[in-house]
Image (cartoon, grey):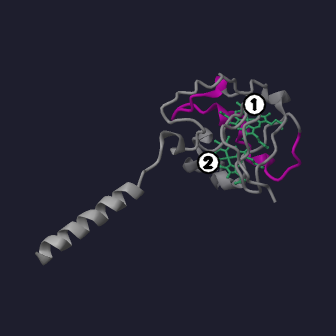
Amino acid sequence: MKALILTCALLTLSLQAGAADKGLTEEQMGLSKTSVNVDPDPATFEYRQADPSTSGVLPRAFSGAPPQVPHGIEDFIPITRDSNTCVSCHQQPDQIGKKKVKGEPTPLPATHYTDVKNNALHMGRYNCTQCHTPQANVNPLVGNTFKRK
Ligand code: HEC
Ligand code: HEC
């Protein structure tokens, strides 16, 4: 008899626990304001098409952040093992530390080389677009409260 009462008590407890745990609704899942089942069909956008000679540069997000690509890159990708157009303009070890000239490619910094004097690019930096991304003028889907100090 005692065992039966205990079993009943445990069963009631577990049923109550189940009722309290309703789980998330479709609207509460993810960062989207709508149900995860709604396909929002966002407007199409275009990356900046600016020519490097006139693009200027974009503000840096914070000190040490990889600068965003200010010019169009469609003509310069894909980056493959045998062809990397980015380095043909940006790999200029002689220009490191010299005054930046507007319209001239910002030279790859010393951090991107294993040996600057011998012009040896660090292969971990070969795939430029892994860190440097082109930009488009779109409103972020989710706001960002990060502030540069
Ligand atoms: C035809 C030459 C050329 C090619 C090819 C080129 N760039 Fe550039 N890039 C420039 C010039 C010129 C600027 C700087 C414009 C200025 O300062 O007015 C620049 C600026 C940049 C900057 C911003 C630097 C800063 O100081 O903020 C990044 C990042 C960059 N390029 C990345 C790339 C990547 C990645 C590729 C390949 C997908 C690439 N570039 C290919 C000429 C080129
Ligand atoms: C693993 C990430 C990574 C890769 C890959 C990478 N970069 Fe960078 N890059 C950075 C970061 C981070 C900075 C800023 C800090 C620094 O100077 O090292 C930077 C800085 C730069 C700058 C600005 C230099 C200056 O004087 O302010 C240029 C130009 C640049 N990178 C171009 C390139 C190009 C072109 C490639 C491909 C050959 C490339 N990077 C590959 C992360 C990367």
Q: Quadrant of ligand 1?
A: top right
> In the image, is 2 to the left or to the right of 94?
left
Q: Which mark is residue 19?
A: none
Disc 1: which residue: 137
Kindly identify which residue carries mark 2. 121
In the image, what residue type sits under mark 2?
Answer: Leu
Label 1, label 2: how many angstroms apart (C-alpha)?
32 Å
Q: Magenta segment: does it hold 97?
A: yes
Q: Nearer the viewer, mark 1 or mark 2?
A: 1
Q: Is mark 2 within 8 Å of ligand 2?
A: yes
- Earlier-in-chain disc, 1 versus 2: 2
Question: Where does residue 123 sit, x and y in percent of width and height?
Answer: 55, 48
As drawn, is 29 to the left or to the right of 55?
Answer: left
Quadrant that contains the N terminus: bottom left
Residue 72 figure quarter? top right
Question: Label 2: how many residues lie within 10 Å, few (<14), some (14-19) or many (20+)?
Answer: some
- Residue at 77% of width from left, 35% of height from top? 70
Q: Nearer the viewer, residue 122 or 71?
A: 71
SS for tag 1? loop
Badge 1: residue crowd in 10 Å (few <14, some 14–19, many ≥20) = few
Q: Is residue 147 magenta?
A: no
Please state if 88 lies on the left or on the right of 14 as rendered.
Answer: right
Q: Quadrant of the C terminus?
A: bottom right
Using the image, determine if residue 111 lies above or below residue 140.
Answer: below
Q: Which residues are magenta?
A: 74-101
Picture residue at 20% right of the left edge, 67% below the top: 8
Q: As shown in the figure, which amino acid type bears the numbered disc 1?
A: Asn
Q: Secondary structure at mark 2?
A: strand
